[in-house]
Amino acid sequence: MEIQVVGVVGAGIMGIGLSQSLAQTGHNVILLDISDKILEKAKQEIKNNLRFQQLFTKNKKVKQLDDILSNITFSTDYQFLQNVDFVIENATEKWHIKKDIYEKIDPICQPEIVFAANTSAIPITRIASVTKRASKVIGMHFMNPVPMKPTVETIRGYHTSNETIETAKKLLVQMKKECILVNDSPGFVSNRILMLTINEAIFILQEQIASVEEVDRIFKTCFGHIMGPLETADLIGLDTILFSIEVLYESFNESKYRPCSLLKKMVDAGLHGRKSGQGFYTYN
Ligand code: NAD
């Protein structure tokens, strides 16, 4: 089956990057969220990202930008998913939100299409269990920012079929991205390690062992990382970090995943990182 029209659920950081990537590789995208205001913001952000990209590629053809944007339909109406060839869900990292979405879209979408969950930590097998197409549910953990990241951690749920894996790989080839296939477990490989590291970096800060800049500089200058753990937390979104570490804590029943209280306080205070303008660093 050809994958031409892709339904993208959730127009936050990941939905925006993903829709842009898909539109740039010639796919038609149905981008869904819960309000027109959020969708308008997403459209503006995609426009800005494309303009920024064009500055660097010295390709200033405005028509091309309009062509790419015209590949994306922005909507709050789930019925638009009736005829899509593939769905990638990127809604807020909360189980009750994702559960509602999958229960809603399962009867709307064609029964043969694949649902890919772009979650940070929620097990794919749990997501598949609320649908009637468990063999067609897979994890596709895209990295942020999607247009710049070449590899996708792809997760095989308990019932995911080989055919579904091949379909997901086919879409990734079309998007010019590589696949690393792993088995299902909360947080998979990347976030089981990364979320612990970020959480521990926040404990270091809370205990006044080092400043924000010092923590990040140690990772950059000593280990050669491009970004430190606190800069990475701001990029991902502190709310998403908290929700993900909570999933790990609940899933493994392991105290090592308990979220740092400073992280909880920052999320309560609305300091969600780059997307809110303030996290460990300040953004304009
Ligand atoms: P975000 O908070 O920026 O965006 C989430 C979006 O989901 C919001 O726009 C929200 O309105 C929308 N949403 C909530 N309920 C919805 C519903 N019922 N229907 C449609 N949309 C709904 O979050 P994000 O950073 O884009 O993360 C989205 C998903 O991707 C999460 O599961 C997250 O764990 C995962 N993820 C995030 C990153 C990252 O770096 N931020 C990386 C990989 C995966």
Image (spheres, helix red, strand yellow):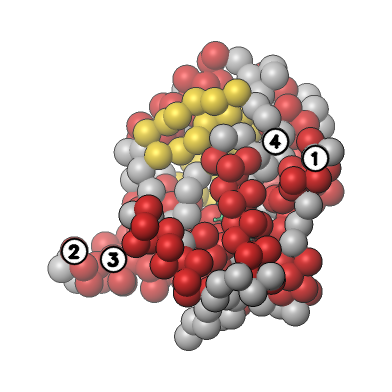
Q: Are marks 4 and 3 in contact (CB under 8 Å)?
A: no
Q: CA distance from mark 1 to mark 4?
A: 12 Å
Most foreground residue, 256 or 113: 256
Q: Element type at marker 2?
A: helix
Residue 116, given in percent of the width and then of the height, sits at: 60, 36
N-terminal of the two: label 4 or label 3? 3
Q: CA distance from mark 2 to mark 3?
A: 6 Å
On the rendered structure, is 148 left or right of 117? left
Nearest to viewer (mark 2 / mark 1): 1
Q: Residue at label 1?
A: 254
Q: What residue do we see at 54% from left, 25% from top? A: 182
Q: Residue at label 3?
A: 53
Q: Element type at marker 3?
A: helix
Quadrant of the image occupied by residue 33: bottom right
Nearest to viewer (mark 1 / mark 3): 1
Residue 4, given in percent of the width and then of the height, sits at: 44, 37
Amino acid under label 4?
Answer: Pro
On the rendered structure, is 96 left or right of 232? right
Q: What residue do we see at 26% from left, 62% from top? A: 64
